[in-house]
Image (cartoon, coloured by chain):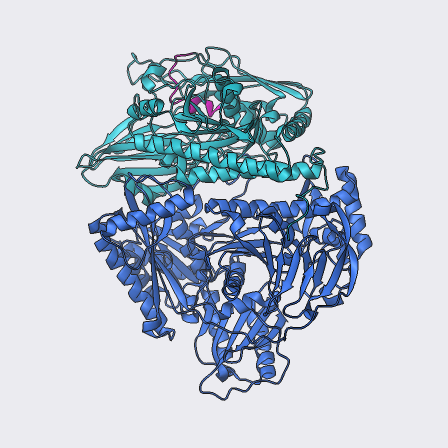
Chain colours: A blue, B cyan
Amino acid sequence: MLAREDRRAPTRTTGSGPEHVLGIDIGGTFTDFVLCHVPTGNVWLAKHLTTPDDHARAVRDGLAELTRRAGVTGADLEVVIHGTTLITNALLERKGVATALVATDGHRDVLEIGSEIRYDTYDLHLERPEPLVARPLRHQVPERCFPSGEVLTPLDETAMRDIARELAKANVEAVAVCFLHSFVNPHHEQRARAILNEAMPGVAVSLSSEVAPEIREYPRMSTTVANAYVQPIAERYLLRLHADLATSGYTRPLYMMLSSGGIATHDTAARFPIRLIESGPVAGALATVTLGQRMGRGNLIAFDMGGTTAKASLIDGGTLTAGKEFEVARVKRFKKGSGLPLQVPVIEMIEIGAGGGSVARRGDMGLLKVGPESAGADPGPACYGLGGTEPTVTDADLLLGYLDPDNFLGGTMKLDVAAARSAVEGLAAKLDVAPDRLVRGIFEVVNANMIAAAKVHISERGRDARRYALVAFGGMGPMHAHAVATGLKLREVICPASAGVLSAWGMLVAPISFEYGRSFVGALSGGFLERAEAVFAEMQADGARMLTEAGVPENEIRYQRSADMRYVGQYRELTVPLPDKLEGDPVTAIRKVFFEHYRRAYGHAHTDVEVQVVTCRLVASSPQRSLSNRAVAAPGGQPTKKRQRQIYFDAVGGYVPADVYDRYELRPGATLDGPAVLEERESTAVVPPGARARIDDELNLIIDLGLEA
Amino acid sequence: MARAEPLVRASNAAELDPITLEVYWNRLITIMDEADLAVVRTAMSTIVAESRDFAVMLMDANAVGLTQAVLSLAHFTAMIPRTTRLMLKRFPPETLQEGDVLLTNDPWQGTGHLPDLTVVRPAFHKGKLVAYIGTAAHVPDIGGTITYFGAHDVFEEGLRLMPCKIYRAGEPNQDVLEILAANVRVPELVLGDLRSLVAAATVAERQLGEFLDDAGLSDIQEISTAIQDLSERTMREAIAKIPSGTYRHSVLIDGHPDRSASPDHAPDPHLIAVKVSVDGDRMTVDFEGTSPETRNAAVNGTWALTAGETHTALKAALVPDIPSNEALFRPIEVLAPEGSILNCRFPSPVKGRSITSLHCHEAVFGALAETIPDQVQAGTGIALILVIHGQHPGGKPFNSFLIAAGGVGALSQRDGLNVANFPINTSIAPTEILENQVPLLLMRKEMLPDSRGRGRRQGGMGQRLVLRTAGQTPATITMRPNNRQFPPPGILGGEPGTLCTVMLNGHPYAPTVVTLQPGDEITFDLPGGGGFGPVP
């Protein structure tokens, strides 16, 4: 897909209007830039160190560099799309603003009590996440609605005014309002905002009926509070960045990457910053989707393995799996239930503590454990020679021959084989195994951990792993992909070209879209559907307004409806896409669609039980941008081997000589047989014995593992 | 290109070194997690799907408990293997076929009361019986009295099914399923839950087969032996760190009045007494001196439940991080006098038995507090269970279920958790979901700061729940409060938490069933946890 960088003269646009698109992805270590000239497919890349004290600085620097190199100004940019970890980090590091909560009288502690479950059954000492708002700032006001939305107790405006005055004195910078059943009747929340605005002008107010208008008060409250907590930060940052862009000549809206895989204007993002959570990894998954489209493949697993974590997401029939919940800022890393729940539209993604820096150690019972603790960048793996003494996954990869000590990060960093070996020997003695066995074992255990997580994720969705190809990126992805794919019984691994800036690329192709969800509970019946139609129409009107404001022509907007449904009496819903046209009686037709999805997910469906709708959903989106890349390299002859080195492979039970190639030398059409490694600056791809690899027209590496189906 | 050879492992699978065992053990846990998800996603009732009152367990070919899902309820997994072995007496392994599924809810063979169904599926691989998949779940109804404590004997408590086959070689046994459906109030939910347990076991059997193929193994016995040996050894090492000796403690818990006595008469409490004897790397937990079984209320525990609760508490105290399995408990013998409230005889009434058994850990922790103070916890405000039922004006029934937690007891280094359960681990239904299911409003759900047991470390806060009718429809609530006479105890000089109180329209309310009429309001104050150490 993504061609290597064009090193020729800049293409000055001569046509009418701006023709370049720019993607900016701020990650933990690097801020990546991709600039693309749409008509020609020319691409410019840049990578700058992230500036944690002020993210906008790296953005300014990178923008200046790229526009200079490409010979364009901000006025030549049709659109700038941006993804950031700002929101995730603010929640993780608890660096949001002083926030207050106003809840229905009697329910302010929902934020702290949560669902009451302990995420570890046996751990007496477990810690829960501190709520973002402590009890003294959790206020409650007399007001109450029935589940129908009908008012039982009107909002006590005098009490509300008293609270507003008190909050004004308390110097809070943001207020979250969350009343029971407000997703049905938002009137009280809206009145509360009016009163708050009056008493404390300029203070950001987040309403649960706007941020996450869905049933289940705890995740809705948690989401609303988290939104309020980061809103002033997001707003300041986005306005500032937009102003910076304006000075370079770009005056159109800045588009922000959302966790749902869509993009929205910075105005929308500033109101709902919680929708920006985890947008970086989502962009990587999105890039995988477009890669699949270009390669004609719909069923893929995007596998991103870096220094501390591995992430995976499923793509089915060319579509990412949409989820509606996410958990952030976990107290116990990777332990489900130990974080703050968010009701936001997300791309479903699993994350586990498996990366190059994952530390191997002896567990309680003398068994080998790998991760989730990471050696990080400092001291890092033992082989970095920065003082690390515990063996990590990278150390094992080095000793297995996957990494070249003299050609790490393009040869800019030399790896210390002796230090890696000594770290391994230390642990091997503690485990009472041979050092060689431990080296293999570290590789095996970290892969097994990733395989197990992926298997649970896949079977939770009632899918069969075998249908997928694995698309590997991130620093460690292409190295471990063959083993992970084998464990999942996949036949094929794809290592995209220029994987280092995959996320930034993914942003360029994201559609402008926004997802709406509104809980509206009722048994599926003709009367219910008529009322639901009004809810859908309202969401559709909101979507039309938001997208036309963002510049999408009204006739190009697409709407996809879906509904969260369940059997009456059940507590979990299944999100079911509703077809545009229903055949015959709509109730029967929708029941049928529900049964089909239920059966696909769980193997059976009860066709005699009443079905209930809980939440109506709608996605309004623009068409996806299609960027065509001019192939930069002509098909050429077979590649030359740089050299050979000894590499370990489990399948043959030992070290074998493997061919070493420079990935940048490979031309479309080249083929090669395993065992082999392909080195590029940021990663190394491994082709196991018996596998065959080829380079496609867009320089992607496709490895056929040669497994029997 | 196809590989010339099937995948040959470099390490001989038979070796089971600390690396291979780590990988295999985790695979077997993952299989149970997949089965757990299958239950959560397909179960029909609130109590199973949302409150997670169920467990799944993998047992080896000898029905020894091997792995469980991460969130499986501990007391269930402590009992499932024994139940399975008892079922196999009736249906010997050599007579079992692929696709057979066994069921029982007999309190004395199963988990201690009738609503818990234990379902066991033998798992075959290439024609050989290699494992058993056990699941247990609390279904929403099993017939009999709707009260928690009202039965005089187990016959009044509903349908009792001795071990039987509900599937024979994959074919449902309609006779049994129809008996079950005919004897419960919500057959759709009960049969739906049962089907979900069977489906989960099927998922697990398939995954297990895949694992054996991947590993090139014909069964899991060698892995099982390795897991058992290592687990038992680890538990022995943990016990050996406790100085040998005899440690005693007792706790008083709420009693129940003689049915003939006047309701104003304060009932005599029950006593849970324990003698923990540590002898090197072995431990005996003997509940001698515990109160006798009673016919005054359905609060009698069976021996298996007592052992399960004791095992859970000791695992949490001694080896919390070791994945749970049956071999951990080999060095621990649990005794309870026959005919006592912790080892009751047939046909004692048992439906509300956990009101008693949930206190076992308090006695055990109390006994060990002096010697391993950093590993024990003060008493926890026991969860309140509410079953809400009635009929909408049109005659359509409604039914829902709520488990609400009190405060957790304090630890030596930390205050107790606010509003959480121990030793059970369940979640409460969201208020907005509850109010959509039954015509009640939960007017308040808030923490009670003054409920904490004081001490060097304070107990966690309990909570207040206030329920009222939403409109003109009355609703009946069957409740199971605890700690009404005796608060959660403190430990090592810590003060107790608060009592549980129930108020109807502002007045104390003693009975355990109430029908809320329009305008009625019922308030539950759930106890805070006990404190740890003297108040500084």
The N terminus of chain A: image quadrant: bottom right
Name the residue nearer the viewer: A677 or A303.
Answer: A677
Q: Main secondary structure of the magenta part?
A: loop
- Magenta region: B346-359
Q: Farthest bottom residue?
A: A14
Name the residue nearer the viewer: A646 or A334.
Answer: A646
Residue B105 in percent (x, y) is at 41, 22
Tally the marks: 0
Q: Is residue B196 above or below residue A208?
A: above
Quick check: B317 left or right of A620? Answer: right
Residue B528 in percent (x, y) is at 44, 34
Q: Is residue A335 above or below residue B296?
A: below
Name the residue nearer the viewer: A566 or B431.
Answer: A566
Q: Is residue B42 above or below residue A706?
A: above
Q: Farthest right residue?
A: A418
Report whether residue A454 is seen: yes
Which quadrant of the structure image shows residue B263?
Answer: top left
At a point 51% along the width and 86% down the height, the residue shown is A13
At a point 63% along the width and 75% down the height, the residue shown is A633
Residue A188 in percent (x, y) is at 28, 56
At a point 53% along the width and 38% down the height, the residue shown is B207
Name the residue nearer the viewer: A529 or B50.
Answer: A529
Report whether residue A338 is seen: no
Residue B394 in percent (x, y) is at 17, 37
User: Does the segment drawn in magenta span residue B524?
Assistant: no
User: Does the segment drawn in magenta span residue B348?
Assistant: yes
Quick check: B510 left or right of B195? Answer: left
